[in-house]
Amino acid sequence: MKASSLCFLSAVVFVIAGMIWGLVMAISEDHSAAPAHAHLNLLGWVSLFLFGIYYRLRPSLERDKGALTQIWIWIAGTVVQAVGVSLVHTGTPSGVPLAAGGSFVVLVAMLLFARLVFLGERADARAGAASSLAG
Ligand code: HEM
Ligand code: HEM
């Protein structure tokens, strides 16, 4: 599957889950898990969709193993963090290792993404400089 497609598909699955979770919180009038809901939506919907747009803009990354790995690590970290933060905020302190572990995993995935962005933008800058020299 293309990197951008994986991002878009997983993002819509996350936002449907996140919206249902939001509705459950609103209807039950129990907002204690709000930080977990917030991050599920922000990491799972907003961030993944943004990754997808970047990958769609960079066709050379669409079949790149590093990009696909980055996305799967992000998805796993997002799920683990959501479970952990939700446990912590609903009175189960043993969720702390999951919350912390998931957070470090998404950080690692963001560093991998940052590397791809830096390499891609640098390659563009070099190509631009070479073509202006040739011109
Ligand atoms: C059907 C859709 C949704 C419903 C019913 C819903 C419901 C809620 C509820 C009840 C809270 C707790 C508010 C509080 O206690 O202050 C909340 C918090 C939050 N939600 Fe949603 N939500 C929905 C979708 C989304 C989406 C799509 C996003 C992000 C793109 C999002 C981001 C947040 C954030 C960031 C917070 C934390 C706000 C804060 O701490 O002040 N929500 N949501
Ligand atoms: C490793 C990743 C992250 C960690 C560990 C983290 C941690 C936290 C913590 C501890 C809070 C305070 C929650 C509270 O007071 O109950 C918070 C709030 C918030 N974070 Fe994050 N965050 C992360 C990533 C992000 C990202 C990527 C976004 C946006 C795209 C984001 C948006 C927010 C927002 C809007 C709030 C305020 C809403 C709320 O209280 O839930 N966070 N975050």
Image (cartoon, grey):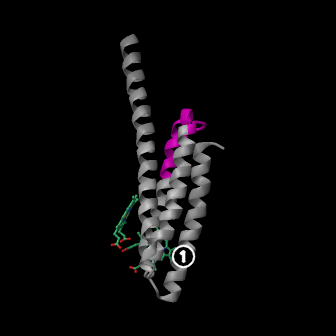
| Image quarter for ligand 1 | bottom left
Task: Name the residue located 51 percent from the left edge and 63 percent from the top edge.
Answer: 80
Q: Is residue 116 magenta?
A: no
Disc count in the image? 1
Residue ID at (46%, 54%): 105
The magenta span reads: 49-65
Q: Is residue 105 visible?
A: yes
Magenta: main secondary structure equals helix
Q: Indicate whether 113 appears above or below 59.
A: below
In this rendered view, identify the residue nearer to me: 91 or 118.
91
Residue furthest top in the image? 134
Measured as percent of width and height from the top left, residue 75 is found at 54, 56
User: Could one spot residue 135 in this view of the protein?
Assistant: no
56 magenta-colored: yes
Amino acid type assigned to the residue bearing label 1 in the image: Trp
Question: Does any atom of ligand 1 lie closer than 8 Å to the CB of label 1?
Answer: yes
Q: Position of residue 116 (x, y in %)?
A: 45, 37
Residue 8, x across and y down, in percent: 58, 53
Assign the N terminus to one quadrant of the image: top right
Residue with the mark numbered 1:
21
Along the line of sight, the residue nearer the viewer: 89 or 38: 89
* Quadrant position of the C terminus in the picture: top left
Q: Secondary structure at mark 1?
A: helix
131 sits left or right of 55 in the view? left
Q: Give how far across and how far down residue 32 sits, in percent.
A: 43, 81
Residue 115 drawn above or below residue 31: above
